[in-house]
Image (spheres, helix red, strand yellow):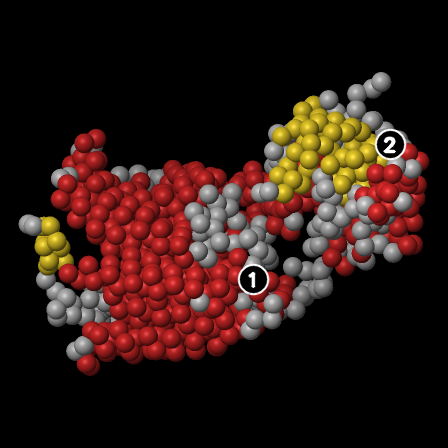
Amino acid sequence: MAEPMLKVEGLTKRFGGVVATDNVQFDVAPGELHAIIGPNGAGKTTFVAQIAGQLRPDSGTIHFDNVDVTHLTTPQRSARGLARSFQITSIFKDFSALQNVALAIQAHDGHSFRFWRPAAKDASLIEPAREILARVGLEARAHVLGGNLAHGEQRQLEIAMALATKPKMLLLDEPMAGMGADDSERMTKFLATLKRTYTILLIEHDMDAVFALADRITVLVYGRRIATGTPPEIRGNAEVRAAYLGEESVNA
Amino acid sequence: MSMTLRSWALAAGFVLLAIIPLIADAIGEPYYLTLFSRIMVFAIAALSLDLILGYGGMVSFGHAAYIGLGAYAVGALAHYEIYDGFLQLIAAMVGSALVAAFIGWFSLRTSGMYFIMITLAFTQMLFFLGVSLEEFGGDDGMNIRRSRFFGSPILNDDMTLYYVILATMALCTYFAWRFINSRFGMVVRGAMSNENRMQAIGFPTLRYRLVAFMIAGVMCGVAGYLLANITKFVTPEFMNWLRSGEILVMVLMGGMGTLFGPLFGAATFLLLEEILSSYTSHWQIIMGPFLVLLVLFAKRGLWSLIPARRSDG
Amino acid sequence: MDALLALEQTLNGVQFGVFLFLVSAGLTLVFGIMNFVNLAHGSLYMVGAYYAATIYEITGSFLLALIIIVPACLITGVLLELAVVRPLYRRDHLDQVLVTFGLILFFNEAVRMIWGPAARFMPQPEGLTGHVEMIPDAPYPVYRLVIIAVGLLIALFLFLLITKTRIGMLIRAGASNRPMVGALGINIRNLYTKVFGLGAVLAGIAGLMAAPVLSVQSGMGEEMLILAFVVIVIGGIGSIRGAFVASIIVGIVDTLGRTSIPILLKVFVSQTASQTAGPALASMLIYVLMAAVLFFRPSGLFAARTG
């Protein structure tokens, strides 16, 4: 069996007396779409932050693409092919959609200590940026400022920027946050097209999307991993149902 | 390219600056030559601050330090009878770069109020250093001769110095324009807009901001170098933190985050100071409230009050 | 440096530190509670000194000056808050820096216009001049002891205010989580005005204490302002306790530094070099200290902010 793209072992993070991440262990196979779900307060945000490199775990290791990245910074992880999108939209509001994506491309096009030629006229940045915008369906909005895009379009731009960094794995943090039914459906269809090309770690609340897309699902409750399995396995798991529906139903 | 009101203002400005020496000569008021030389020097300083402030989001309250460094590069070397303008310029630029690297390395790890304070503190340190260097006159400062080029004291002619400064200002503005739109500039601007995102897409932002900080310091050092040549005098007062505040005000007055705002702001600030002080020695009592009103009501600076095309900046 | 000199210098350091506390307490409160950068705090200190000198000139009584200064500075502070500071709470720090910088220019000129450009001197109050021998053969200026006493009293007062009163509780809450306090329905605007007024009074009292020792003149506030900022950055913004500890540390480090560094230097370099570099290094010492603290503890020693 091939080495996992992402391997997390013994990940633990405490804030004062609260254990936000409790000795979590799991892995993501190459080309897999692995979803992480859990009720509110499960520690998903903290978990994502540690994978992405924004937060240092207290203990445990993270291996990405066979390399120990536990002590690497976020830019270093990005350079190795780990791209993330943010749950709370985090785009460049003062730049156009095209510039947003161009910047992401620029980040992986060597160093940026270039002081002379205008970046906006740099075809090696602009052309690929256009292509990616087209892929997510935003090419008509290329010149609209990020802050002026509709919420759903901003979420699309989030993904576009992650894709622009030519990643090996996408860490998608609630890509459908705040989306209505139509937008969510569109996003789900789009994410389906990304499967196989990219390894995807998907954090989501939207159960329809999760069960439609995921190869495997991991359930986090109070920072602990309580189950990992295929969608049917998770659907049938009593402990998972209890976590979502309350203690009473376990005895029911 | 259609001319907007802004472009007209700009063109008019440059034309005016080009002919000031001739006007000053004609009406027999050489003082205007000195005045506008100073304005242009501070325009360069303000522009350099805007690079990191308006485009980089780094609120440095220590920018006057580089004016001092540039000036003392001229002063110290002149004191030891090294008058070569090229050597002094190199000293000014290298000195500013090194000090900026040092200060930036510490300061850029902080943000917000702490960043303001730590840049301020470093400037104070340099100020005290200048005051205590008896060799260079301490807090009395010292008189110096103007720089020479190829052994020739061509800058002794005020008009020549003026045009050298004008050319330098034009050059700096051009560099700034290139810089802002370059890949490097985009990183700096992106880091101001959303540093988290920049890191997430793979930019190690600290090194870029540090280099930007250094570039701004070097450009301001050049301004200091020119200032010393105008005044033929160097003093630690160049590095007084209140000077840092004034440069900050110039950037804001003109409009930060724009290329020409700082130039406009420096001119406005110094001309206002000039006009007000000719009426009353108590001009600061007007300047103070004027500044207050400006920030409260014309936040984006006076330059932004001149209409431009929608996507102009 | 012998033990007696060391003791005297340490006491001087404590006195300077306590004095710094008077200057910086108001600043840290205003910055911590209202998140407002007040560069004009030094001007409030200066205004206090001018008020004190004037009242003393008219009445000849130091005590009267102390009593009258409180309402005078309170009114000055409150007027300033209502007129200029209020609109700025929701603006970013840069705007606040620029506006209060404008206020510095305004105040510096205003005192020149009202009191003239010449420095004013306030003599040390009678009864507080002279020395006292706490240790035999080691006279120490009474006035310095008075400063220490006044400073400690005010520190105690503030401590009681902050920990034992309702308004103190609001101040602590506001310092650690401002939005929450507003959400709880407390009249924030009122609270802010009171805090600003308190800050102005504290600064004014510092000005009063300083007047007999330093000369009262336009621009005297700025030097204190920078020191105050260094203190609150080291101590942790919003923390009175931090301001107190940091002030004492800064006071002692600065005073001892100024005496010992030239002496230390003489060991390593020539007489002239140590005379040149000594004072420079001593002046830079507290900034080095601040940079070091920021490097290891970026939020200061007693950071109050959680919200």
**Label 1's element?**
helix
Residue B228 seen by the camera: no
Q: Nearer the viewer, residue B45 or A14?
A: A14
Amino acid beneath label 2:
Gly
Amino acid beneath label 1:
Arg
Location of residue C224 by image quarter: bottom left
| Residue drawn at the location 27% of the way across and 76% of the way down | C67
Q: Does residue C162 lie above or below C47 as drawn? A: above
Tell me the chain of label 2.
A
In the rendered image, residue A247, in percent from the top left (x then y), is placed at: 81, 45
> Which image quarter holds the C terminus of chain B?
bottom right
Marks 1 and 2 sit apart, C-alpha to C-alpha, by 45 Å
| Residue drawn at the location 83% of the way across and 32% of the way down | A228
In the rendered image, residue B215, in percent from the top left (x then y), is placed at: 51, 43
| Residue drawn at the location 52% of the way across and 49% of the way down | B111
Q: Does residue C35 lie above or below B297 as drawn? A: above
**Label 2's element?**
strand
In the rendered image, residue B50, in percent from the top left (x then y), is placed at: 54, 54
Dot label at residue C178: 1
Q: Does residue A77 lie above or below B149 as drawn? A: above
Outermost residue, front direction?
A251
A25 relative position to B7: left or right: right
Dot label at residue B272: none
A125 relative position to A208: left or right: left
Outermost residue, bottom direction?
C58
